[in-house]
Amino acid sequence: MTSPDLGAEPTWRVDDGHRFAHAMCLECHWRGPGRRARETARQDGRLHALAGCGDDVALRELYSGLQDAGGAARPTAQPQIA
């Protein structure tokens, strides 16, 4: 896995025009699960960008790393992979 360019424009955005916020990938059109907290949707988008489009194994590893570390930004569910 390559390191993301932190100075580059994000390849995802958060759609929060409804009751729930969703992270959306601008490259592969992935859409994360509905979240009540925008920050959690942003975390889904960041994790998707770090794992790479369509790499659900790497994404699950990132989530399990956050859960094992007991981080404050720990997601409650895994995002849906399109």
Image: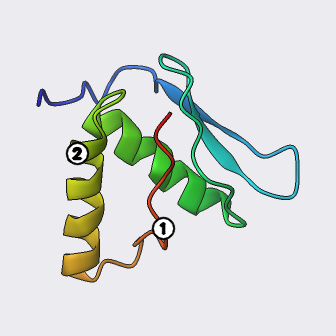
Q: Which residue ends up furthest to the right in the rendered image? A: 18
- Mark 1 crowd level (few <14, some 14–19, many ≥20, 10 Å Cα): few
- Specify how the rendered protein is coloured: rainbow
Name the residue located 67 percent from the left edge and 66 percent from the top edge.
Answer: 37
User: Circle 1 sits on which residue?
Assistant: 77
Name the residue located 50 percent from the left edge and 33 percent from the top edge.
Answer: 82
Of residues 8 and 36, the one nearer the viewer is 36
| 53 vs 63: above or below | above
The x, y position of residue 44, in whole percent, is: 48, 51
**Callout 2: SS:** helix
The x, y position of residue 21, in whole percent, is: 72, 52
Amino acid type at image mark 2:
Val
Q: Earlier in the sequence, mark 1 or mark 2?
A: 2
Amino acid type at image mark 1:
Ala
User: Circle 2 sits on which residue?
Assistant: 57
The x, y position of residue 35, in whole percent, is: 67, 61
